[in-house]
Amino acid sequence: MSPGPKSLAMFEQLTAIQECSSVHFFVDYHNSIGNYIVDADGNRLLDCFSQIASLPLGYNHPAILSALSSPQNQSVMANRPALGVLPGTDWPDKLSFIMDKMKPRYSSALSDLWDITTMACGSTANENAFKAVFIKYMDDHRGGEPVSQEALNSAMLNKAPGCPHLGILSFSGAFHGRTFGCLATTRSKPIHKLDVPHFDWPMAPFPNLLYPLDQHVEENREEEARCLEEVRTLLKDSRAGLMTSTIAGMIIEPIQAEGGDNHASPEFFRSLRSMASEFKIGFIVDEVQTGLGATGKMWAHEHWGLGEGEAPDIVTFAKKAQIAGFFSKKEMRPREGYRIFNTWMGDPGKMLMLEAILKEYEKCDLIKNTSITGDYIKEGLMVLKKKHRKM
Amino acid sequence: MSPGPKSLAMFEQLTAIQECSSVHFFVDYHNSIGNYIVDADGNRLLDCFSQIASLPLGYNHPAILSALSSPQNQSVMANRPALGVLPGTDWPDKLSFIMDKMKPRYSSALSDLWDITTMACGSTANENAFKAVFIKYMDDHRGGEPVSQEALNSAMLNKAPGCPHLGILSFSGAFHGRTFGCLATTRSKPIHKLDVPHFDWPMAPFPNLLYPLDQHVEENREEEARCLEEVRTLLKDSRAGLMTSTIAGMIIEPIQAEGGDNHASPEFFRSLRSMASEFKIGFIVDEVQTGLGATGKMWAHEHWGLGEGEAPDIVTFAKKAQIAGFFSKKEMRPREGYRIFNTWMGDPGKMLMLEAILKEYEKCDLIKNTSITGDYIKEGLMVLKKKHRKM
């Protein structure tokens, strides 16, 4: 479908004030409903795109509209607070509610270990997750000794020892965002990275599996073993000082999205987790795209069957949650205030939406529904594949 | 004032799930009004803090509440779009309105040169301003030649030539945000930077002036000349390849806020602007804290008396605007789509608030009022200073 005349006229208007060649068409959000998006020219389309996977309940859902129209909530939105210094009286309850409904769960022993930090978007969630990992790494390094004056002085000049040469390991095909910290871990397409200075952080291969998975068990096991071996080599090289930056953490998506629909086995991820523990580095799971029920569980990494001591150190989220941020183990908490901090620290207005979304998930059993619908679509795709297989 | 018992109880609740030692007290936003903030225990305080300078009309302003309660606007908030691909039908008009009311103005010849790009917060505004500067710098370098395959390949590995060793020059005492790109230009306090890896970008001295300015004209002129000379030396060193990163742009606040209430003369800033042109690098003015009328003009840098050819290349904003982003000269526009891009590209819900704010500014002549009130407060402070001067 090409954009209609009204979309084209708006496109011309917008082109006068910004580069907007990425715009597909203009949307009549007032008249879009459920899974159907309506464009400026009145065309109604089935929306499988969901605003880059960030719209969990479809358009104009009554639960969201009702949350936004309550007068009590309007004063929350009208007075955007600096949450790190002046949170509202209902903020601790809101955060506790979110924790209760959506924190990652594996077994009772593992499920209560989490802090929550809120941010405005996926990139700032990941950037601050990296900062938490670096601060923890250097805290461990100091072993309780106070920060030296030399470190404080050199930090102001962007130099070691205050600004150490630490890095985050990421995987081929990964997408973790576009700000300068995130971008150094993003490995999906050159267009994101070209012309921009980058931290010289290392990359490991993400398994390149053969599908269908159940028909290639042996080859895929070998491919995953090869990737794990490369990760181990990088971690050993880092420990031996052979790299320009010492690896303080690794970040991975449970399913690669932007980099292609790339999967790996639960064993692969559990092995990475265990290697991170062995080398005493942070293990960050990026659930910005996969989280909030997209895989039939609240978090995709809940499919890994994690046991005692295997929980990630940090799990980041954004998109469908409307608000962004991360869950983190208690030991990732900085010793001082203002270290993971910014003006807004997220947005209580978006938290109202997340609250409504989570209640609706529960009321309509939507995560289970995703699982059922997912199976149905996959089955249909398999039938189509058989039917249209090349001879 | 110490926090009351209700704030203390909430503090305990919040401490269970996050590091929150930066929290001052908990706020009853529903009952706060105008300049008065009400805490959890019912204390009413005159608020001179304004949520880290981000609340332009005070608490529960009727114009904001009315914008948020209109049903048409609620569908804007309920359906947060990916603005870079699927903006709403009213988005071009909203952006045009914002441009009309708040784009920087100097003389008629200079005032129509701007593009606008929206983001979610001050840090992402600055990070993307840096990216725009780097992309422009490398576009100029290529001089119309296509991007080489070597550049595309090396970009995926975080290496030159795809990821060139470029940097942004910033000034001592500067604050430009806390994500990894911004943080490399922030120079206010070690606590922001400690333990975090940094780009090895250069720093120039911000003038350390003597106050009152009118009693130290000669010394201050010398101090500014010294700082300008250091900037020139850094730019020459960069051009000669003597630095680890080549300077592609500089960023400066018209008044340093976080780094202390530090001023410099219009001549100083105009000299920097001219040096940026001479060395063919981008000149970014960070108005995140100073913008939206705080200095008696819409933008603090409008006080510099800029003439033809002296407009900044980019002006960034956030805080009081609720939405963030930047204005930029047409020649800063990337040649390709998706280069300055992310999932949300700002938030139309916040744009509704900005629209209401700008209308209220105009209706009540609030920027002029800031100027009058500012003079009144300054005069009072001078009287207090004389009265309490050390003997």
Image: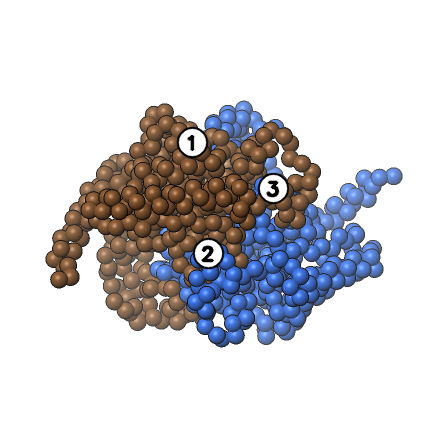
Chain colours: A blue, B brown
Q: Secondary structure at mark 3?
A: loop
Work out how far the residue at label 3 is from the one at label 2, CA to CA, in angstroms: 27 Å
Q: Tag count in the figure?
A: 3
Would you say the residues marked 2 and 1 are in contact, meaning their CB atoms lie under 8 Å apart?
A: no
Specify the amino acid type for callout 2: Leu
Q: Which residue is mark 3?
A: A194
Q: Which quadrant of the rendered structure holds the C terminus of chain A?
A: top right
Q: Which mark is residue A245?
A: none
The residue identified by callout 2 is A157
Q: Nearer the viewer, residue B321 or B317?
A: B317
Q: Amino acid at mark 3?
A: Leu
Q: Residue at x 55, y 63 (%)?
A: A133
The local crowd at label 2, few if under 14, some if 14 to 19, many if 20 or more residues have their Cα within 10 Å, is many
Q: Residue at x 61, y 53 (%)?
A: A200
Of the pair A252 and B231, the residue shown nearer to us: B231
Q: Residues within 10 Å of mark 3 (few under 14, many from 20)?
A: many
Discs 2 and 1 lie in a common subunit: no
Mark 1 belongs to chain: B
Q: Which residue is identified by label 1?
A: B114
Say which label, 3 or 2, has the lower sequence index. Answer: 2
- Give residue A27's position: percent from left, percent from top: 52, 35
- Tell whether B304 sits left or right of A363: left
> Is A266 positioned to the left or the right of B347 in the image?
right
